Image: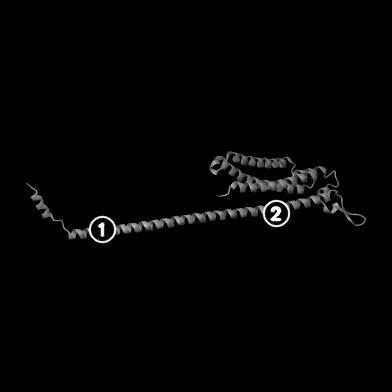
Amino acid sequence: MSRDPYLDVKREVENAQSQARELYNSYLRLTSTSNNQRVIGDARQDLETSLGLLEVDIEDMEDSVKAVEESGSRWGLSHGEVERRRRTLESIKADVKKMRNTISEGQSPISASVHLNGKHRGSDPFSDVELGQTGASSTRKGNNGAAYSDDPYAERRSDELEEYEMQQQQIMLQQQDTAVYRISNTLTTLAQQAGLIGQEVMVQNEMLDDLSTRVDATDNRLTRANKRMQQFIRQNEAYTGRHPPQEGHCGESGAALKP
C-alpha cells in the first residue's frame, strides 16, 4: 500500500515552520535590543523569504487536505481524521499570518534609517558615529595607545551580529538537511513505484504464461478429437465397403409378407 502523501507534506511544512519561527524570534529580539538597521533589515528579509517558502508548502498541504475532504471515505479516512488535518492546517496558517502581521506592523528599516539621518544629523554631532557611517572617527586611541570606541553599544551590537550570523548558518544547514531529506523521499518513492511496476509486470507475465499453457492444452485436445473423428470416419467407410446394404433381399422379404 502506498504511503499517505499528507504525512510527507506535513513533515515538510512543520520543518519550514520551525525555521520560520526561529527567524521570527531572532527578528523580534533584534528589533527590541539593537539599533543596527542593516542587521534588522537582513533579518526581516530572511524572515520574509522563509515565510514565502513556507506558504508554498502550505498550498501543497491544503491541496492534500481538500482532496480527502471531497472523498475521505475513498482513502479510508474517518471524518474525525479529516477534521484534525483541517485544524492542523488552519493552525499553521494562523501562525504564518501572525508573523506576517508583525512584520507589516513594524517600522520599515529603510524608513527608520531615513528618520534617523534626517532628524538628528544636524543636531547630533555624533550621529554619523552612531549610525556607523564614518569608521575612522568612531574609533580613537587613549593615552596608552589602546583603541576605544565612542559608541558604548558597539560591542553589544557586534555580539548580536555574530549571533545572528551563527543563527543564519544553522538555518542554512537545516535547509540543506531538509533538501537532502526531500530528495531522499523522492528517490524512495521512485524506487517503490519501480518495485510496484516490476511486480505488476511479473503478474502479467504469469497470466500470459498460464494463458499460453491453457491454449496449448486446448489445441492438443482439439487435435486428438480431430484425429479420433477422422479415424471414426475411416472405420465407418471401411465397414460400409465390406458390408454393402442388401436391397434385393429386403425387397423379397417384403414381397413375401404381402397377402
Q: Residue 192's image quarter?
A: bottom right
Q: Which residue is more in the foreground, 170 or 114?
A: 170
**Of the residues shown, which amino acid type is indicated by label 1?**
Phe
| Circles 2, 1 touching at the beta carbon (< 8 Å) | no
Residue 69 at least partly seen: yes
Residue of label 1 = 232
Most distant residue in the right direction: 143
**Residue 185 left/right relative to 216:** right
**Of the residues shown, which amino acid type is indicated by label 2?**
Leu
Q: Position of residue 185 (x, y in %)?
A: 61, 53
Q: Position of residue 62 (x, y in %)?
A: 60, 43
Most distant residue in the left direction: 259
Q: Position of residue 170 (x, y in %)?
A: 72, 53
Looking at the image, which residue is at 77% across and 51% down? 163
Residue 132 at least partly seen: no
Check disc 1: other Cα within 10 Å, few if <14, some if 14-19, many if 20+: few
Mark whose residue sits in front, 2 or 1: 1
Q: Which residue is more in the foreground, 3 or 251?
A: 251
The colour scheme of the drawn protein is: one colour
Residue of label 2 = 173
**CA distance for labels 2 and 1:** 88 Å
Element type where label 1 sits in the image: helix
Q: Earlier in the sequence, mark 2 or mark 1?
A: 2
Element type where label 2 sits in the image: helix
